[in-house]
Every structure is written in C-alpha cells, then in structure tokens.
Image (cartoon, grey):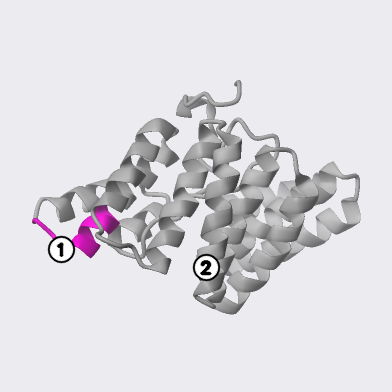
C-alpha cells in the first residue's frame, strides 16, 4: 500500500495506519471525545460510536454536545481510513464552537494531525500536532499534554524522525501514567518497543513490550496482549 491511500481493507483493525512503517496500535493517534460515542470508539465499536453520535445530532444539541458528536463522526471516518472525510468532519466540529477552549483545541488539533498523517500531508500534520502539544502544556494538564505529545510522535514517525518520536513518546507515557490512561500507555510502550527494535536494540524493545503487556493483561485487552506477546517472544 502506498503512502496517502485510504483503503481501510488493507489495514489491520489493531494497526489502523497501514502506510506507516512503524504504526501505533488502535485507535492510532485519533482521540475520540470523552462521551458515550467516544467511549464506544475507544472500545473498538466504530459503527456503534458513529450511531451514538448521529443520535445526539438528531436532538438539536447545545454547541458543546454538537462538537463532541461531530468530532466522534470524524474520528469514526478516520478509523475507517476515510481520512479526507475525517479532516472535513474535524473542521465542521470546530465550526460548531464559537471559541474552543484549550481542551477542545487539543482534541481538534491532535485529530487533525492524525487525519493529515493518513493523507501523507506530513508537514501539516507535524504543525497541527505541535500546536496540540502547546495547548496541552498551556493547560498544565498531564493528559492533555500527553495527547499532544503522542500526536506529535506519530507525525514524527511518519517523517522518519524516530529519535524525536522516541523523546515525545517517553514524555507522553509518563503523562498518561500520571493520568491513569492505560490504553495510551500501552500504545506508547508498543511504539517505543518498535522504535528500539528497528534501531537494533532488542533488549530495550523487549523491556517496552513487557511493560505494555503488564498493563494490557489486567485490562483484558486480549488482542493487544497477543500482538505484544508475539513481539516479545519472537524479536
């Protein structure tokens, strides 16, 4: 598959960015809103999340809820590999707000970066991710800063800037740990393991796969456990 294509049938549901040599686990660098639709998307129920978002929009919701529903639909498009539609949807979600606050800006910018990576518009992706990181740090919120840092790491990986990606991921995993976000910690450890393995450092790679497994097993993420186990045992 060539960079920038959008045929989701070529993607593993667990590795939703098929054009990346080192790709993040589901849901990639897409960050659904913190509502019912977003929780369904995080759980892997893309159609269920989209359906919940459409139901919200049918009820003439207030601006904040409309923003969340539109963003959830955009993320669902991104997770299906429809990156152009995702980018348009993110713009529509942003337009639902008169003036987004920093938390909303982090979501808008991180997801925009993810869609731009999918479209292989990498300079724009890095720029959006850098702005997401800046907005998260401005909030002095560990999780929000880690969201921006993770988005920037994935954009760096797409550009082949693996040392920069490793730095951002090391920061992000600490932020996600302080915030108690297990899914994103596992994503960080997986990517750090892949970067280390690709850099011919199997001991460090194994350490990150092991750390990811230690988090994924209690969470019952069986598909992630299987993938990380294969990485740990065969690399």
Crowd around label 2: few <14 · some 14–19 · many ≥20 (10 Å): many
Is 65 in front, or is 188?
A: 65
To which residue does mark 2 refer? 136
Q: Is residue 83 above or below residue 27?
A: above
Q: Could you tell whether 172 is left or right of 161 in the image? A: left
Image coords of residue 131 (percent x, y): 53, 56
The Cα–Cα distance between marks 1 and 2, rounded to whole angstroms, is 24 Å
Majority secondary structure of magenta residues? helix
Note whether residue 235 is visible.
no
Using the image, tell me which numbered label, if any, was put on residue 149: none
Give the SS element for disc 2: helix
Q: Does the magenta stretch include residue 186?
A: no
Whether residue 64 can be seen here = yes
Residue at 90% in and 50% down: 201
Measuring from the top left, give residue 16's x and y in whole percent: 53, 39
- Left or right: 137 in relation to 37: right
- Quarter occupied by the N terminus: top right
Whole-percent x, y for residue 105 in the image:
41, 60
Label drawn at residue 62: 1
- Residue range corresponding to the magenta coloring: 60-70
Which residue is at a point 73% across and 46% down the rendered structure image? 230
Image-based side of 98 in relation to 180, left or right: left
Residue 59: x percent and y percent?
8, 56
Q: On the rendered image, what quadrant is the C terminus found in? A: top right
Kindly identify the residue that appears in the image at 77 percent across and 60 percent down: 208
């Amino acid at each position: 598959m060539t960079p920038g294509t959008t045929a989701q049938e070529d993607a593993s549901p667990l590795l939703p960015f098929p054009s990346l040599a080192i790709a993040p686990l589901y849901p990639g660098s897409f960050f659904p809103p913190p509502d019912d639709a977003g929780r369904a998307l995080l759980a892997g129920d893309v159609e269920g999340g989209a359906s919940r978002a459409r139901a919200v929009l049918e009820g003439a919701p207030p601006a904040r809820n409309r923003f969340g529903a539109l963003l959830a639909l955009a993320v669902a498009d991104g997770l299906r590999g429809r990156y152009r539609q995702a980018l348009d949807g993110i713009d529509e979600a942003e337009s639902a707000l008169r003036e987004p606050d920093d938390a909303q800006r982090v979501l808008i910018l991180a997801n925009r970066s993810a869609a731009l990576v999918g479209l292989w518009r990498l300079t724009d992706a890095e720029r959006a991710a850098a702005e997401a990181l800046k907005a998260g740090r401005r909030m002095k919120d560990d999780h929000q800063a880690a969201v921006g840092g993770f988005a920037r790491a994935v954009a760096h990986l797409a550009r082949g800037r693996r040392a920069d990606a490793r730095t951002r991921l090391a920061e992000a995993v600490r932020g996600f740990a302080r915030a108690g976000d297990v899914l994103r910690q596992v994503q960080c450890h997986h990517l750090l393991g892949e970067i280390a393995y690709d850099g011919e450092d199997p001991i460090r790679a194994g350490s990150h796969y092991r750390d990811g497994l230690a988090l994924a097993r209690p969470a019952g993420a069986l598909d992630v456990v299987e993938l990380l186990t294969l990485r740990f045992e065969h690399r």
